[in-house]
Amino acid sequence: MMNALWVSKTGLNAQDHGLSVISNNLANVATTGFKKDRAVFEDLIYQIQRQPGALSSQDSRLPSGLQLGTGVKVAGTQKIFTSGSLQETSQPLDLAINGRGFFQIAMPDGSISYTRDGTFHMDAEGQVVNASGFLLEPNITIPDQTNTLTISRDGIASVTLFGDTEPTEIGQIDVVDFINPAGLQAVGSNLFLETASSGAPQVGVASEGGFGSMEQGFLENSNVEVVEEMVQMITVQRAYEMNSKVVSSADQMLQYLAQNT
Amino acid sequence: MDRALYIAMSGAKQNTLGVAAAANNLANVSTTGFRQDFEQARSMPVFGDFYPTRAYAMEERPASDFNPGTLVETGRDLDLSIDNQGWFAVQDDQGEEAYTRRGDLHVDALGRLINGEGKQMLGNGGPIVLPPFEKIEIAKDGTISIRASGDEPAVVADVGRLKLVSPDLTQMEKGTDGLFHMAGQQPGDAQPLDVAVQIVPGHLEHSNVNSVQALTNMLSLQRQYEMQVKMMKTVDENAQTTTSILDIQ
């Protein structure tokens, strides 16, 4: 049947995906450590209907052929790892990485996932956990009787106990980095998993060897920019409308044919 | 049978192909770096052992539109677009050099620099592979400099240069993979680097599809198609009238 129908169907499909990506970004405009996605489109293969240079008579050739494109596809979504702005909260367990790097979170099944969300809490045993209650890796236990907790820019956690004047070192928060952070798999809850495309995690110390510094009392805001998403949304909506116009035109052509012959 | 029927039929059939071409342009209205295709019809006389009396319609794609698309600021270090004319050289699936305007680059797990379509970017000395880096800067002439992980801020390494070319546009054609190739390109052929091509870092080039034009073109083809069908109907009616003359009352 009509080629154009299927081609415009791919266009509608792509814009539909585009809108879901935008709405997810907008929904997460206030999510700590969120990294926005971008829908990546690519054109589908072209079909050669007539080869350029085919003979048009015994001694003449066609200067151009006919190659028809078959539409567009969503090649995937790409996480954009630009940094979000840092917001001061003054909470001792709010951490942000200013630069490259991820926190490690030990999942209940023993695997490790990675996050930029540094909203940490303390559980009943004094262990440092994220908002879902999963342990920070390597874990730090904050003793009873703690007066102040200090986390240095290179991730060393130290506490001052009541009655003490000297701080005691209780652990070190490592950070990890990936050669291709955009290849990480987002699994929700602000967590990412390592994939074949992200490369293996490289563990390091904050503020050293290319890693960002650890900032206590700060949180990293979402890197979604509302104005940009709004403009994207307008583009997507209009592109969707134009593709659906093609569908209705193709439909009218078939209808006209059916009614007039 | 009346030959007018077949001529009208060929017109209608070629119009549907034209609509498909316009639909493909519209479907790719938001594909990064996409170049819209032109579409035209040619009248094709029928040659044979007789005088050419008829001309059928024939749809063709004469070329793609090489006008630059809109540049959109993204602020990402690896989003590049080419200022005015020029092309990025990439490796196609056969390992040959091909050209694209698509510059949404990223680095894969092996450090290869690839674009949004997954095509390996070519540099001066072949495919570009980057060591782990903390910060990357791509200059206007395509020179890539990085601050490798762990290096002092003052240590900036030059790790290659993107191959930017500007071949003769009249010899470029879009292949079935959507990348541009040179007409009559032989395996191993490569275009020379053109130092005059400038890139704009932090921007992406949108599709150059003129959506209003593509939509209007599609609507005009639709009406043309309806005229062809109307012709077919008229021919049919003529045939019916002729038959009815012969009807024995």
Image: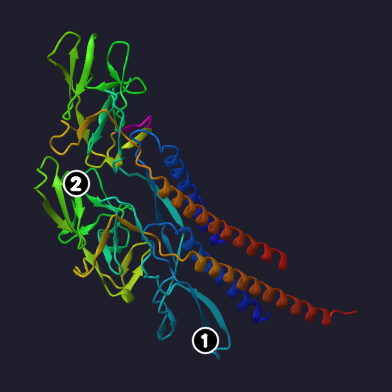
Contact flag, marks 2 and 1 (Cβ < 8 Å):
no
The three-letter amino acid code for the residue at tag 2 is Lys
- Can I make out residue A201 in this image? no
Q: Residue at x 13, y 53 (%)?
A: B159
The front one of B3 and B220 is B220
Q: Secondary structure at mark 1?
A: loop
User: Could you tell me which chain the residue with mark 1 belongs to?
Assistant: B
The magenta segment is A188-193
**Which quarter of the picture shows residue B30?**
bottom left
Q: Is residue A189 magenta?
A: yes
Residue beneath label 2, please?
B135
User: Could you tell me which chain the residue with mark 2 belongs to?
Assistant: B
Report the Cα–Cα distance between label 2 and label 1.
Answer: 68 Å
Q: Secondary structure at mark 2?
A: strand
The three-letter amino acid code for the residue at tag 1 is Gly
Residue A242 is situated, as x and y percent measured from the top left of the image, at 54, 59
In the picture as drawn, the residue positioned furthest to the bottom comes out as B51
